[in-house]
Amino acid sequence: QVQLVESGGDLVQAGGSLRLSCVAAGRIFSTRDMGWVRQAPGKERELVARITSGGRPDYADSVKGRFTISRDNAKNMVYLQMNRLNPEDTAVYYCNAGILRTSWGTATNYWGQGTQVTVSS
């Protein structure tokens, strides 16, 4: 089995910063793209940022210049540094990763359980 476990969500004031972490644990041969998706109450899930296995990032326009995604392939971890947070960033943040459990076959998409980020004005 493979599990993604997020941490780092918290209540923060507008203008503040948070760092989210996600670790993929279990039988893992390699990880492909990893990313963060968020869902605010009453809204659809939104891709926040993703990063390829080679380290190339991609961001939603709403977070460009404020958020930075990074990863540690040796530890099967992905991070999201969030700066200059505003109330519109309030959401549950989910970690997502494509994972190969063996050297053959195709990658399977896994999701974490989510971590709450609340930004007060």
Image (cartoon, rainbow, N blue to C red):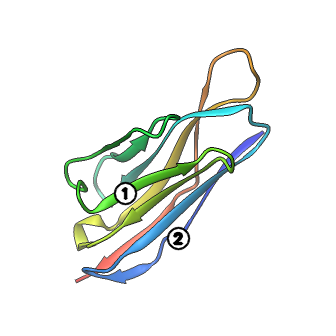
Question: Is residue 40 visible in the rendered structure shown here?
Answer: no
Between discs 2 and 1, the one toward the N terminus? 2
| Gap between marks 2 and 1 measured at Cα | 15 Å
* Residue shown at 23% from the left, 54% from the top: 64
Count of all numbered marks drawn on residues in the image: 2
| Mark 2 secondary-structure assignment | loop
Left or right: where does residue 86 sit relative to residue 32? Answer: left
Any mark on residue 79, and which? none
Q: Nearer the viewer, residue 68 or 28?
A: 68
Question: Is residue 33 visible in the rendered structure shown here?
Answer: yes
| Residue 57 percent across, percent down from the top left | 37, 42
Identify residue for label 2. 8
Compared to residue 12, the image places residue 93 above or below, namely above
| Residue 5 percent across, percent down from the top left | 64, 56
* Residue shown at 31% from the left, 70% from the top: 83
Residue 91 in which image quadrant: bottom left
Left or right: where does residue 86 sit relative to residue 56? Answer: left
Compared to residue 13, the image places residue 87 above or below, namely above
Given contact means CB atoms under 8 Å apart, are the residues at marks 2 and 1 in contact? Answer: no
| Residue 60 percent across, percent down from the top left | 26, 46
| Residue 59 percent across, percent down from the top left | 30, 46
Which amino acid type is shown beneath numbered disc 1?
A: Thr
| Mark 1 secondary-structure assignment | strand
* Residue shown at 32% from the left, 80% from the top: 16
Q: Quadrant of the C terminus?
A: bottom left
Identify residue for label 1. 68
